[in-house]
Amino acid sequence: MPMYSFGQHRFSRDVVVKTDTTYECNNMRYESTVIRPNIDSGMILRIDDNPFRVSFISEMKNNYNNGIFLLFYPLSGMPKEKGMFINGDEDGEWFYWNEKGTLIMKKIWRKGKVLKTIKYK
């Protein structure tokens, strides 16, 4: 049976909801595929077609972002944002990088509201 895999997660193509999308970033257009194991829960991957790479990873539970969230720059594949969601709200420490991979900012979130922002030079 054909499988998608990401780390420990294995997704059978027979039970995956796959959505082809087009989005724009920095005046460039990207074709991508969103892979999720079912409608309302599980790990979600958005895979860009050109260049072929993962552009974001998110965990869903009961149709809300719940758990780790990673966003990558489309061309370089470098991390852009990393944080956690709880019931659809940002929570805890979030980290933000520039396109060269340098940490530029950290935010502390609680239930979707920013408590503190730290900017790095």
Image (cartoon, rainbow, N blue to C red):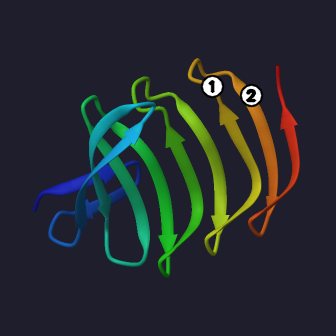
> On screen, 9 above or below 29?
below
Report whether 91 appears left or right of 81: right
Number of residues whose C-alpha sits closer than 10 Å to that of mark 2, classed few (under 14), some (14–19) or many (20 or more): some
Question: Given the image, on which type of amino acid does mark 2 rest?
Answer: Ile
Which sits earlier in the primary sequence, circle 2 or circle 1? 1
Q: Which mark, by number, is residue 111?
A: none
Report whether 38 appears left or right of 114: left
In percent of the image, x 63 and y 25: which residue is there?
98
What element does badge 1 sit on? loop
> On screen, 62 above or below 31?
below
Between 26 and 38, the one lying in front of the other is: 26
State the residue position of label 1: 98
Number of residues whose C-alpha sits closer than 10 Å to that of mark 1, classed few (under 14), some (14–19) or many (20 or more): some
Question: Given the image, on which type of amino acid does mark 1 rest?
Answer: Asn
In percent of the image, x 54 and y 46: which residue is there?
70
x, y percent for residue 115: 89, 56
In percent of the image, x 50 and y 63: which residue is there?
59
Quadrant holding the N terminus: bottom left
Between 109 and 7, the one lying in front of the other is: 109
The answer to the question of whether label 2 and label 1 lie on touching residues, with beta carbons closer than 8 A, is: yes
x, y percent for residue 61: 51, 76
Report whether 68 appears left or right of 92: left
Q: Of all residues shown, which one is farthest toward the left?
A: 1
Q: Quadrant of residue 40?
A: bottom left
State the residue position of label 2: 104
What element does badge 2 sit on? strand
Q: Of all residues shown, which one is farthest toward the front?
A: 27
> On screen, 16 above or below 98?
below
Quadrant holding the C terminus: top right
